[in-house]
Amino acid sequence: MQSESVAAADIRVGDTIQDPGGSNTWRRVEDLGYDTQPREDHAPEPWMVYAFIGPLVDPFADFGVVGNQATSDRFIFREDQPVTRVTAS
């Protein structure tokens, strides 16, 4: 498996993505959410914010879901943040 960096808007249900902080924590996306967030510089246009909801997984192991972690939680990305996702090849 390899990883690639994509825009948050390119993530779909079924993708496996890395924690926005860059840790070695991954989630399999089972649901998507959207919202807006004010910009720090008080610009009139807010940020689009993406929530990627699903269980923690180990994309590099055969067994998938990690231990007894919560069944579902979320990673949140602003539209300007790249998202690292796992690809099959």
Image (tube, rainbow, N blue to C red):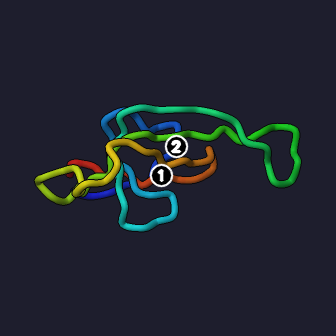
Q: Is residue 85 left or right of residue 7?
A: left
Q: Residue furthest bottom?
A: 23
Q: How many marks?
A: 2
Q: Which residue is mark 1?
A: 83
Proximity of marks 1 and 2: CB atoms separated by less than 8 Å: yes
The 10 Å Cα crowd at callout 1, few under 14, some 14 to 19, many 20 or more, is: many
Q: Which residue is mark 2?
A: 8
Front residue of 70/15: it is 70
- Where disc 2 sits, the SS reads helix
Question: Residue 89: percent from the left, percent from the top?
Answer: 20, 52
The 10 Å Cα crowd at callout 2, few under 14, some 14 to 19, many 20 or more, is: many
Query: What's under tag 1, amino acid-wise?
Result: Val
Residue at image point 30% right, 36% down: 14
Residue at image point 56% right, 39% down: 50
Residue at image point 46% right, 48% down: 6
**In which image quadrant can residue 79 be found?**
top right
Question: Residue 56: percent from the left, percent from the top?
Answer: 32, 52
Front residue of 84/30: it is 30
Question: Residue 45: percent from the left, percent from the top?
Answer: 81, 37
Query: What's under tag 2, amino acid-wise?
Result: Ala
Front residue of 16/9: it is 16
